[in-house]
Amino acid sequence: METLIETHELKKIYGQGDATVHALAGVDVRVKRGEFVAIMGPSGSGKSTLMNILGCLDSPTEGEYLLDGRDVSQLSKNDLAVVRNQKLGFIFQSFNLLPRLSTLANVMLPMLYNPDDEISDDVARDRAIASLEAVGLGSRLHHLPSEISGGQQQRVAIARALVNNPPLILADEPTGNLDTKSSVEIMDILHKLHNDGGTIVMVTHEPDIAQHAIRVICVRDGLVVSDGHGSESLCMGRKEMA
């Protein structure tokens, strides 16, 4: 399979002198197109920093990050914003839906910020409807986020992540705010996306959720300490998780 994500000696350093923190201390990660990967680790392990860099929300201090064959390590903030819109779909723990917009309008948003792909309002609406129907919310097009359940809000977030047909889906604690039934529904949707050829990288602190992935990358003290199926058991060496 073709490599979609590749990092080389990725480092992220905060502060100076005695206050220096090495959030990432030289991370090498490779994710092939079509994989479903979970990232786990204790609080302060560096997994959130790694996820932010993979999501082009932050840049490394040192090292190289190739996304879909392009080195995005040191791009400007504006260039990173374009990459995020074209290459990445985000699913957040807190859903991040705009409360005053309908589910349909929330899903249409990514298409409004794609400067290289002029999409008519009718096409954008049709694509957003199709995306909502794909997650079982075709009957909730005009509901506000406050008018639907947490599980349904997360499905709206998934529809929004998919609407630009990105090569990579990044899910940050996608079940963290959900009850067990809703968590199962969300993981079923992610499994379907993966079975349809989607590439998913997911951060989670829940071993039962990590077990849904094909690979588990365990991060500790800014380094990858294990990588493989079943590695979630090796990430539980400390009581505090994040």
Image: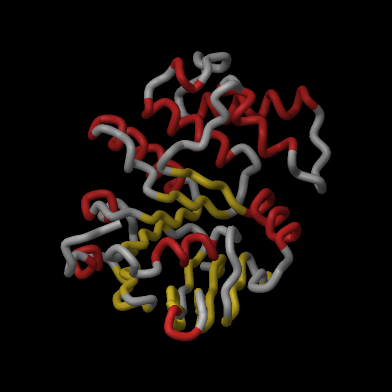
| Residue drawn at (75%, 27%) of the image | 123
Q: In the rendered view, tell whether residue 226 sits above or below residue 195.
A: below
Residue at the (51%, 50%) spot, across then down = 169
Q: Residue at x 80, y 43 (%)?
A: 117
Q: Give percent across and percent down for residue 190.
A: 41, 43
Q: Dividing the picture into quarters, in which one does residue 178 lie?
A: top left
In the picture, measured across the screen, residue 235 lies left or right of residue 60, that is: left
Q: Looking at the image, what colour scheme do you see?
A: secondary structure
Tell me which corner region of the image, top left, top right, bottom left or bottom right, holds residue 240. Answer: bottom left
Place of residue 45 in the rendered image (x, y in percent of width and height, measured from the top left): 34, 69
Q: Position of residue 20 (x, y in %)?
A: 45, 80
Quadrant assignment for the C terminus: bottom left
- Depth check: 136 or 57 in front? 57
Q: In the figure, residue 187 lies in which quadrant?
A: top left
Q: Position of residue 37 (x, y in %)?
A: 39, 60
Residue at the location (47% across, 29% down)?
A: 135
Residue 131 versus residue 175: which sits nearer the camera?
A: 175
- 4 left or right, relative to 181: right
Q: Is residue 120 left or right of residue 227?
A: right
Q: Is residue 138 above or below residue 190?
A: above
On screen, residue 106 above or below 58: above
Q: Residue furthest front?
A: 18
